[in-house]
Image: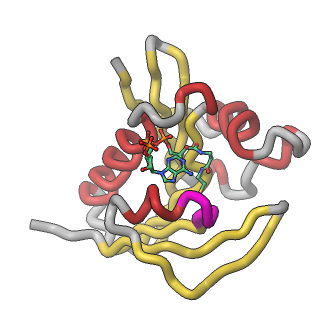
Amino acid sequence: MAVIEQIFPSLTWRIRHVTMYPHQPYDFVKLEHDFDGIHFGIYVDYELTGVVSLFMEDGIGQFRKLAILPEAQHQGLGSQLMTYLIDFCKVQKLTKLWCNARVNSTEFYTKFGFHQTNQTYSAAGFDFVRMELVIQYG
Ligand SMILES: CC(C)(COP(=O)(O)OP(=O)(O)OC[C@H]1O[C@@H](n2cnc3c(N)ncnc32)[C@H](O)[C@@H]1OP(=O)(O)O)[C@@H](O)C(=O)NCCC(=O)NCCS
């Protein structure tokens, strides 16, 4: 059974590194503002298996570095974490949630109601597009 908990920032780093940037130095995955964020982990059989980080400002949330360990992908864990994150944003009464999505992951976010904007960029060998979700209440 999968359990989602709020976790310390440093616990995200190994999962981010292994999943997203294994060929970069370990410190590459540490974010300047990590200690201002709220971080969630999904545990499977007590093992930390996936992470996501939320940064809130003026009623708007940005999530970063959603990562499910490669061997645990396509089992619904990313979807569980995303559903939990959106519910958390509602508790926080946020109006919008956005991310810079890797273009090969946009389909995943579309399932949750995110729409693509025309803001794109490339970094560290990946193409990104900004995606936004208007949070619905009631
Ligand atoms: C993207 C990611 C978080 C999805 O988590 P997950 O646990 O694999 O996703 P789920 O099992 O809940 O849902 C997967 C479904 O989303 C859709 N999907 C679309 N693009 C996808 C992608 N790049 N990876 C996984 N699923 C994707 C598919 O419909 C997929 O269904 P399938 O498993 O039947 O093919 C995970 O694959 C991951 O960590 N990828 C590497 C890092 C990454 O790209 N992070 C996002 C950066 S923006």
Residue 64 x %, y %: 58, 56
**Who's the residue at 63% across and 37% down the image?**
12
* Residue 104 belongs to the span the image colors magenta: yes
- Extreme residue in the left direction: 138
**Who's the residue at 59% across and 68% down the image?**
100
Residue 104 x %, y %: 61, 60
* Colouring chosen for the image of the structure: secondary structure
Residue 96 x %, y %: 37, 73
Observer-nearest residue: 39 or 73?
Answer: 73
* Residue 17 belongs to the span the image colors magenta: no
The N terminus, quarter of image? top left
**Image: 14 above or below 128:** above
The C terminus, quarter of image? bottom left
Our reading of the magenta stretch's main secondary structure is helix
Which corner quadrant of the image does residue 86 belong to? bottom left
Residue 32 x %, y %: 74, 57
**Image: 120 above or below 13:** below
**Who's the residue at 47% across and 13% down the image?**
46
- Extreme residue in the top direction: 45
Magenta-highlighted residues: 101-105
**Image: 112 above or below 15:** below
- Is 99 situated left or right of 21 in this image? left
